[in-house]
Image (spheres, grey):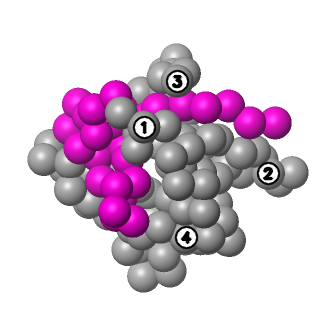
Amino acid sequence: PTKTIRLQNVASGKNLRIHDSKVDANGGNGPFTKFIMHKTPNKLIKLQSAQNTSEYVALGPNGQVRTGPGGKFCEFQVVKHEKRVVSLKSAHSNHYLGFTKDGNFHLCSNPKADGQRKKSKFNVILA
């Protein structure tokens, strides 16, 4: 089962996007900010670019954000906070996807820690 969503980063106030094969949280409401959310049988998700379907959001083994082809580093565990507010934890490390107020990538390890609370949270918006 899939859903098309946007993820608005709480720190930047802007949407997660893949643009020119780079991942940031500086998107508006254009096509680069739409993601097809795939649920895996083991209750993980993958975020596939709706604009360029060969690219997925990935968090590499060394904690680098990048695009990937849909393999294991594209798998995330959803951590729910409030209604429609989530963090995305790598399924294969203790790293969380996070962004600064400027929309630049910031590796997070604890969405409850003071400096990481907003950076690692996303509002889920149906696209």
Residue lying at 23% horizontally and 30% vertically, measured from the top left = 13
Amino acid carrying mark 2 in the image: Thr
Foreground: 85 or 20? Answer: 20
Between the C-alphas of marks 2 and 3, the distance is 20 Å
Mark found first going from the N terminus, 4 or 2: 2
Hey, which residue is sitting farthest bottom in the picture?
62
Residues shaded magenta: 1-29
* Residue 63 sits inside the magenta stretch: no
Q: Kindly indicate whether the residue at mark 2 contacts the one at mark 1 (C-beta within 8 angstroms).
A: no
Expressed as whole percent of the image width and height from the top left, the position of residue 70 reads: 66, 65
Mark identifier at residue 31: 1
Q: Secondary structure at mark 1?
A: helix
Pointer 3 local density, CA inside 10 Å: few below 14, some 14–19, many at least 20 = some
Mark found first going from the N terminus, 1 or 2: 1
Expressed as whole percent of the image width and height from the top left, the position of residue 74 reads: 60, 64
Amino acid carrying mark 4 in the image: Gly
Mark identifier at residue 40: 2
Amino acid carrying mark 3 in the image: Ala
Q: Dot 4 corresponds to which residue?
A: 68
Residue lying at 29% horizontally and 46% vertically, measured from the top left = 25
Q: In the rendered view, does 126 fall on the left or right side of 44?
A: left
* Residue 7 sits inside the magenta stretch: yes
Q: Secondary structure at mark 4?
A: strand
